[in-house]
Image: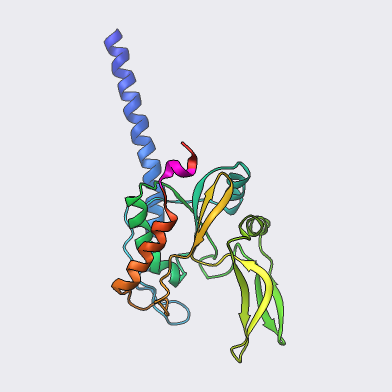
Amino acid sequence: MKKFIKYIFVIFVISMVITGCKKTNKYALEFKEEYESLNGVVNKSGKEHRTINIDKDNPYIKTTPEEIVKMIENNESFYLYVGDPLCPWCRSVLEKSIEIAKKKSVSKIYYIDIWDDEGNEILRDKYELVDGKATKTIEGTEAYTKLLGYFKDVLDDYTLTDDNGKKIELGIKRIFAPNYFRIKKGKVSLMIDGISEKQTDSREELTKEMLDDEEKEFNSLFIDYCDIDGC
């Protein structure tokens, strides 16, 4: 009888491990499919999406802006990526982000999308120039407004450019894509975009020098996970 109970216990433990692995792989595979499904696809502007190869064991976990707000308010420590499969700059840095995350033993990067499948804003507010004046045309979500407040010290300014190439300052901050955040105990300690300053076109071929710059960026972002969690 004891042997039988021990046998059942072992089977239970193995099943729990397998179930856990499937759950982890589910997020990674969803991320892989979401981005690779656009490889070589021509968008509405007639531009082809960069072809990228996403590791099936990548650390990306999709979540919601509301859940990220809760994690911050609970003083949790984690990495966050804000981007979108349709974002060409995001597609430029993803492979390097996964490579360095794995080297640094980072097992989780939470991510939220900024657009729907048609490229419409689903998170952020949007301003456009109407008769020469900056006008809000899309209202951001409540969660986005809260994130702006939490991240304001590391965010870039939101600017528009008129037909003459003049920049219009809006006097507010914006979460761009890609933006990567390192949050420690509810406080953002670093934000990067991962993009090399040598890259001037989102769809150009990435040179070794550009990839080296990306590596430096992500090495600065990803630190030993215990350093973040305080374990």
Q: Report the residue that reaches farthest toward the top.
A: 1
Q: Position of residue 111 (x, y in %)?
A: 49, 55
Q: Which residues are magenta?
A: 224-228
Q: Position of residue 11 (x, y in %)?
A: 31, 24
Colour scheme in use: rainbow
Seen in the image, is 95 located left or right of residue 145? left
Q: Is residue 124 visible?
A: yes
Depth check: 17 or 82 in front? 82
Q: Is residue 57 visible?
A: no
Magenta-span inclusion, residue 80: no
**Residue beneath the point at 42% across and 76% down:** 202
Classify residue 12 by image quadrant: top left
Relative to 86, is 31 above or below?
above
- Would you say the magenta stretch is mainly helix, strand or loop? helix
Depth check: 178 or 154 in front? 154
* Image quadrant occupied by the N terminus: top left
Relative to 157, is 34 above or below?
above
Q: Report the residue that reaches farthest toward the bottom.
A: 164
Magenta-span inclusion, residue 225: yes
Q: Position of residue 42 (x, y in %)?
A: 40, 77
Seen in the image, is 208 located left or right of residue 84? left
Relative to 151, is 129 above or below?
below
Query: Disc count in the image?
Result: 0
**Residue beneath the point at 52% across and 45% down:** 77
Q: Position of residue 130 (x, y in %)?
A: 70, 83
